[in-house]
Amino acid sequence: MFRAGSQTRFWFLAFLLCAAALWILKPVLLPFAAGMAIAYFFNPVVDALARREMPRWLGALIVLAGFALIIALIVILILPLLEGQIGALINAIPGYVEKARNHLIPSFEDWLERFSPEDVARIRDAAGQYVGNAASFAGKALQNVVTGGIALIDVLALLIITPVVAFYLMRDWPQLTATVDSLIPRRPYPIVKQQLDEIGMSLSGFVRGQALVCLSLGLIYSIGLTVAGLQYGVAIGVAAGVLSFIPYVGTSFAWISSIILALAQFDELGRIGFVAGVLIFGHVMEAYVLTPRLVGHRVGLHPVWILFALIAGIRLMGFVGVLIAVPVAAVVGVLTRFAVQQYKDSSFYKDPLAPRPPSGMP
């Protein structure tokens, strides 16, 4: 019924309609995207319980109850500690700024005396412009996250809809995947199924592995910085662990915030070196132990590509974009590798005049 050209037009039109629907409905997508993320993350646990002859509805209910219990324990046990440390840090910032100003401004003024008044004016104008651009970018990014997500969805509705969506998705996961499988065109079915399997492996390998990396780094930094005697070490460790889902951001935050606070709090080089040792240990564990073992090198998602996808998701769709950025990056990455391989196997890449090996030889 469909020829190759009409099939191409059909799938291109379907893609455009899906993209338009996502763009139009993005103000109400947050609880559904969050529910899908929770279901995807915990579905293997439900599968394991189902293999033990437990009904899927009961397994999904147990998993959601366990997840809610973990969130409640975090709120009850950790949130007050974080709230106290963050509040104390905010109150201490003016004192740290004053201390830094007393130490740095004389040295900075001595350095500026080497330049002419015109050069000093240009340096100040350039610095002010860069600071203003950075603040503007950060403010717009935060505004996109807020206005694109939680500000347009009532928090109560989010708390109600998200677990309901997650429950039904985990309960009906086999039927949903079977339905999607039945809709794949039959002629290219083997190729499409192979690409979908690669997308699933890449996505699950990154998301679940990176979540464990974030948890491990949060514990390493929180415990290590607290043992080092750094004030607000738990707050820095938790924030660094959460931000580690974005490649480079968590480690950079831990280094910058910890070193600045160590310089402001300690006068002994040994204490500052202890803090630096904790940061080095965390970086080594992340680069050579946690990421290779928990995430692996075969997920096909380069850190720079993930960073770009997350920033683009924030700019385009706010907090919903953060939730769907990694799945979209996985899909685009797998399809790009497939397209490159098809190109290399085509006559556009190969030299048609190149001599072919004799028959019977590899």
Image (spheres, grey):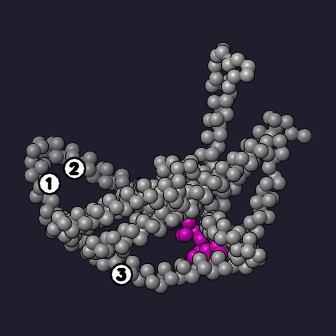
User: Which secondary structure, mark 3?
Assistant: helix
> Is the magenta region chiefly helix, strand or loop?
helix
The stretch drawn in magenta includes residue 326: no
- The numbered mark, 1 or 3, whose residue comes first in the sequence reads 3
Mark 2 belongs to which amino acid? Arg
User: Is 162 in the magenta?
Assistant: yes
Q: Residue furthest bottom?
A: 76
Secondary structure category for the residue under label 2: helix
Query: Foreground: 282 or 165?
Result: 282
x, y percentage for residue 9? 77, 40
Q: Is residue 106 above or below residue 190?
A: below
Residue designated by label 2: 124
What amino acid does circle 3 point to? Answer: Gly
Residue 226 screen position, x and y as percent: 31, 74
For marks 3 and 2 on the same chain, the one whose residue lies earlier in the sequence: 3
Residue bearing mark 1: 108
